[in-house]
Amino acid sequence: MKKTAAIASQILVLLVPCTFSSLALAQQTAQAEVQATPDKLVEIVRNSTTQYLDNVSAATAAGYSPVLGCVSGPDHGAMGVHYVNSSLVNGPIDPTQPQALIYEPTANGQYKLVAVEFIILAGALPANSAPQVEGHLMQYIDSPNRYGLPAFFELHVWAWKDNPQGPFVDWNNHVTCAHQ
């Protein structure tokens, strides 16, 4: 009886680590699959902006024009060069028609689309509005601000360049203005 109990405890000692390592592996695989699946808004943006990916001329033909030059972060990262379609800035917010296309200057002098930004002036909305795009709340930027704009709401979507902070964070450490 003692021998059987000793064997059972040895088997248990061997099985417990195997069970936990299997659970950990399954959890890591599930997390990787979730991270590999793009957010619905990211997919919508990719599908609706493909024609602008390496083609600033297509953006300007569609009514987008550069503003502010290349925007770099106050202490890290950058956004890039914003090409804004001013006819879209007062809304409505449509996930297939971002107000701004954001390009990163490349070493060869070209521009590459890295993100979009949804923008709506606060004055174009009813008081106490909380605008959103496909379930993502837009961030309120008060006035005065570094851009010299009246108060507005904005949401960045890093659809074409990975942002280590996440696809909806303003600044991207993988973007640089060094080649402008």
Image (cartoon, rainbow, N blue to C red):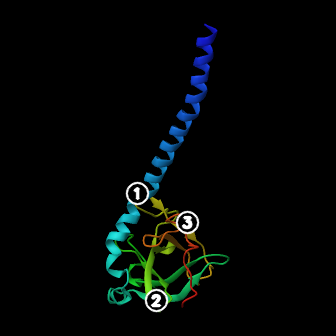
Q: Which residue is mark 1?
A: 37
What secondary structure is marked by label 3? Answer: loop
Q: Which residue is mark 3?
A: 164
How far apart marks 2 and 3 lie (CA) works out to 26 Å
What secondary structure is marked by label 1? Answer: loop
Residue at (54, 42) in percent of width and height? 24
Q: Quadrant of residue 113?
A: bottom left
Residue at (40, 63) in percent of width and height? 41
Residue at (48, 50) in percent of width and height? 31
Q: Nearer the viewer, mark 2 or mark 3?
A: 3
| Numbered badge on residue 66 | 2
Q: Residues within 10 Å of mark 3 (few under 14, many from 20)?
A: few
Residue type pointed to by label 1 = Thr
Residue 85 in percent (x, y) is at 40, 83
Q: Quadrant of the C terminus?
A: bottom right
Q: Nearer the viewer, mark 2 or mark 1?
A: 1
Nearer the observer, 118 or 51: 51
